[in-house]
Image (cartoon, grey):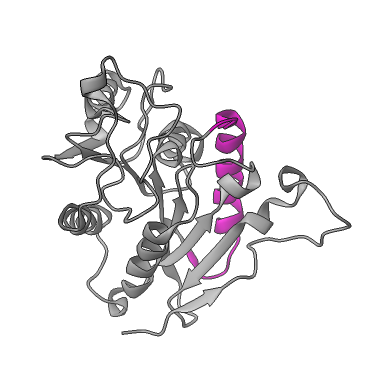
Amino acid sequence: MAAIVFLTVALGACARTGEMPPNLLPLGDFVAVLHPGGTAPRATAVLVPGCEGVGSHIDDAARRLAEAGVIAIVFDYPRRQSLDPACRMLDLAALRRDLVAVVALTLREVNVVPDRLHLIGWGQGGSAVMAVLADVAPRIRSAAAFYPDCTRLERWQVPVPMLLLLGDADRIAPPEICARLAEAATGGENVLAIRYGGAGHGFDAPTEMAAPAATAFWRSPRAAPRAAYAPHVRDAAWADLRAFFDLPQDASGL
């Protein structure tokens, strides 16, 4: 297995001057890189967490990618927007703009293969990935979203292959909404939606999804939102994602 090198140096970072609020700091200050090592050009994935931030499930995702020889770019937008796990005060429009800019920054890095760039989002981060596809389509190969909130998306355009990894028992981000959105989407034939039976919201997050987000909705107490970590579903989802992105079993394939 190739050595994994964690680079805390921000991507495209600029020098800071004095104390500034997070949302006024350079965008690169909120981007970190997990690199599998070496100098050869490699496939790359930009990871966009949910409002709970860069938790253990995002670290695990970055390491899984690096072990497959993929450069993992983690965009910590919750810290940039000073969000709490309940997602209060989320500026989704700003997140979309920032994500387009992060893609542009990523493509400036020397080891990134332009036609092997993928986006992966979780929760609201997944919603943002879905929303920017039309803006970044010429620059990326494909995208995936774990249990995204599809309620805010309208007139969805899907110009590149898109994988939706949904919990069939998710009451925070109901999979039916994403399914209807995909059916009505322009380019909907590019969407592969997988619903994991019995899986709830945050099925790959051991601790970060312990409490439902304040932005969640439900129609009766019996339908109250439920988050449920399920390692077997997490592993199944990652096997599906690896196949969808056509990732090699080891770094020698890149």
Residue 13's quadrant in the figure?
bottom right
Q: Tell me residue 210's x, y (percent).
A: 35, 46
Q: Tell me residue 25's x, y (percent).
A: 75, 50
The residue furthest right is: 18
In front of the other: 70 or 177 = 177
Residue at point 65%, 64% (across, down): 10
Residue 36's quadrant in the figure?
bottom left
Q: Tell me residue 8's x, y (percent).
A: 60, 70
Residue 164's quadrant in the figure?
top left
Identify the image quadrant of the N terminus.
bottom left
In the displayed structure, 2 sits above or below 195; it is: below
The answer to whether 63 appears left or right of 79 in the picture is: left
In front of the other: 15 or 196 = 196
The residue furthest front is: 221
Residue at point 28%, 53% (across, down): 204
In front of the other: 177 or 120 = 177
The residue furthest left is: 197
Residue numbers of the magenta segment? 88-112
In front of the other: 28 or 38 = 28
The answer to whether 157 appears left or right of 170 in the picture is: right
> Overall secondary structure of the magenta stretch?
helix
Q: Tell me residue 121's x, y (percent).
A: 40, 45
